[in-house]
Image: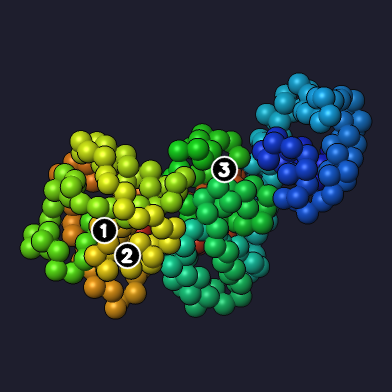
Amino acid sequence: MIDLRRLHVLRAVAYFGTVTAAAEALHLTPSAASQQIRTLGRELGVTLLEPDGRRIRLSQAARDLLVHADAIEERWQHAQATLQTAARPVTGVLRLCGFPTAVSALLAPLAAQLRTRHPALTVRIVESEPAASFDLIFAGHADLAVIEAIPDGPALTDSRFDQQALLRDPFDLLVPAGHTLTERDAVTLADAAREPWVLGMPGTSSRQHVLAACSAAGFSPEIAHEAREWNVVATLVAYGLGIALLPRLVQLPTNLAIKHIELVGQPIPSRQFLTCIRRGSHKHPAIAKALSHLQSMATPPPA
């Protein structure tokens, strides 16, 4: 009989890339993680870890086993969901995670709804960026994530995750109050081509969205300032230090002298929100309730 916990350690090494990283994610020591995999190998009569210079790597037998391991994990998630479905009322702990906008606009109100409708269910929220959210879901430290689709994230076909489209959040042009563009109800991105811009920090998805959209509109923005937090971006704009693109769902302080202007024409940049759970867990009562509520909340934000 195979110990599913050992199989999970093997999957974690493949996912995180090294025994050390997998052990950290699973709250094990590297030696304990290695021992779990070696024990699994002895049970199966194969070698799962082999030397690679000063390090170790998964063997071909391990990679072959992983194909089946993901399927076994999916079936196990199905089994857990089936057992929980028989329980009434919805109980236990539901762990949610997501990036800041997702927490503010979706996960916080979701938690409040679930607390009211299912008082026996405990909901916990952790703020985490998309890449970290995938890690939390995989490791079993979160049950449902709302993420922004990112270029280097797991593919929608990744057998370890179940990702579904939730909503699209368009960007608006953010300008200081009194800016000449505020005389218009809507503008094209090209109308702002000669303005100084406030962009996100290098490597952030917001910066990638802006640069890609400006390039598609036929210009390269003059980068005047860079900031990591949307509140900082908006503050720089309010002081007349530049303009910016801001996702419509971002919640800002109400005292800033800024104006949101709807973009028209093409391109209109936007970010795609996805839900992510472990594949096979969608029928778990708490997860199913949360997904249903999220879908009902996921109306496109008004201009």
| Label 2 SS | helix
The relative height of residue 59 versus residue 243 in the rendered view (above or below) is above
Quarter holding the N terminus is top right
Mark closest to the chain's N terminus, 3 or 1? 3
| Label 1 SS | loop
Point 30% across, 76% down: residue: 254
Residue with the mark numbered 3: 161
* Residue 135 or residue 116, whichever sits in front: 135
| Label 3 SS | strand
Estimate the spatial distance between the alpha carbons at disc 3 and disc 2, rounded to whole Å: 39 Å
Instruction: Report the side of 42 relative to 83 (left or right).
Output: right
Point 20% across, 51% down: residue: 195
Where residue 236 is drawn, which disc sits there?
A: 2
Q: Say few, some or many: other residues with alpha carbon within 10 Å of mark 1 (under 14 / 14 to 19 / 20 or more).
A: many
Point 76% across, 21% down: residue: 60
Residue closest to the far left: 183
Residue with the mark numbered 1: 242
Give the x, y percent position of residue 11.
72, 38
